[in-house]
Image: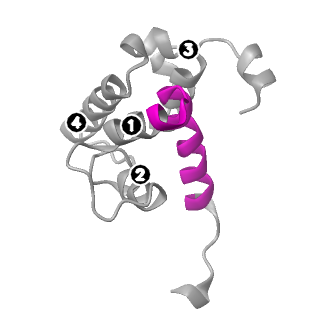
């Protein structure tokens, strides 16, 4: 999503969203509206609630944000961690952000974009 798209797009109500990524697009546009103090740990809790609601209501939607899920597994490799963090993806991104002087929410969305781009690339059959 370009800066121009972000500045032009109107707020959408939760009932207008179709999946977790559309929800995250709304968070990206207005983080302080959705997440207290811009904390990734609060975002992690919100996403855990989202994932739990999917399970409770039997909704079949891919959900990548459990602390042992696809996003976390990708992140451990991306951050060159030799083993998964027991503290979770939010804490590790906050630590990485602090080291680089980058706002944690900004780093999360940069990593999320990278994760999605890699995940959505067609796989080379020779690699499998």
Q: Position of residue 73 (x, y in %)?
A: 36, 59
Between the C-alphas of marks 2 and 1, the distance is 17 Å
Q: Which residue is mark 3?
A: 30
Q: Which residue is mark 2?
A: 71
The magenta stretch is 98-119
Q: Earlier in the sequence, mark 1 or mark 3?
A: 3
First in residue order: circle 2 vs circle 4:
4
Question: Which is more foreground, mark 1 or mark 4?
Answer: 1
In the picture, measured across the screen, residue 49 lies left or right of residue 95, that is: left
Element under label 1? helix
- At a point 38% along the width and 46% down the height, the residue shown is 61
Q: Which residue is mark 1?
A: 95
Q: Is residue 113 magenta?
A: yes
As drawn, 111 above or below 76: above
Residue 64 counted in the magenta span: no
Image coords of residue 52 (percent x, y) = 22, 36
Choose the circle earlier in sequence order: 1 or 4: 4
Helix or strand or loop: what does disc 3 sit on?
loop
Is residue 41 placed above or below 84 in the rendered structure? above
Q: Residues within 10 Å of mark 1 (few under 14, many from 20)?
A: few
Q: Is residue 19 left or right of residue 54?
A: right
State which quarter of the image contains the N terminus.
Answer: top right
Could you tell whether 13 is left or right of 51 in the image? right
Looking at the image, tell me whether mark 4 or mark 3 is earlier in sequence order: 3
Residue 101, visible in the rendered structure: yes
Q: Position of residue 70 (x, y in %)?
A: 38, 56
Nearer the observer, disc 4 or disc 3? Answer: 3
Whichever of labels 2 and 1 marks the residue nearer the N terminus, that label is 2
Whole-number angstrom distance, CA of label 4 to CA of label 3:
23 Å
């Amino acid at each position: 999503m370009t800066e121009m798209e972000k500045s032009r797009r109107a707020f959408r109500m939760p009932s207008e969203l179709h999946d977790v990524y559309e929800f995250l697009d709304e968070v990206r546009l207005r983080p302080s509206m959705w997440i207290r103090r811009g904390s990734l740990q609060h975002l992690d809790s919100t996403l855990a609630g989202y994932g739990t609601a999917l399970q409770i209501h039997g909704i079949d939607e891919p959900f990548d944000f459990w602390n042992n899920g696809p996003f976390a597994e990708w992140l451990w490799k991306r951050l060159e961690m030799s083993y998964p963090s027991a503290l979770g993806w939010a804490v590790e991104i906050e630590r990485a952000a602090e080291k680089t002087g980058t706002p944690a929410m900004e780093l999360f969305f940069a990593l999320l974009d990278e994760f999605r781009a890699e995940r959505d690339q067609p796989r080379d059959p020779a690699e499998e």
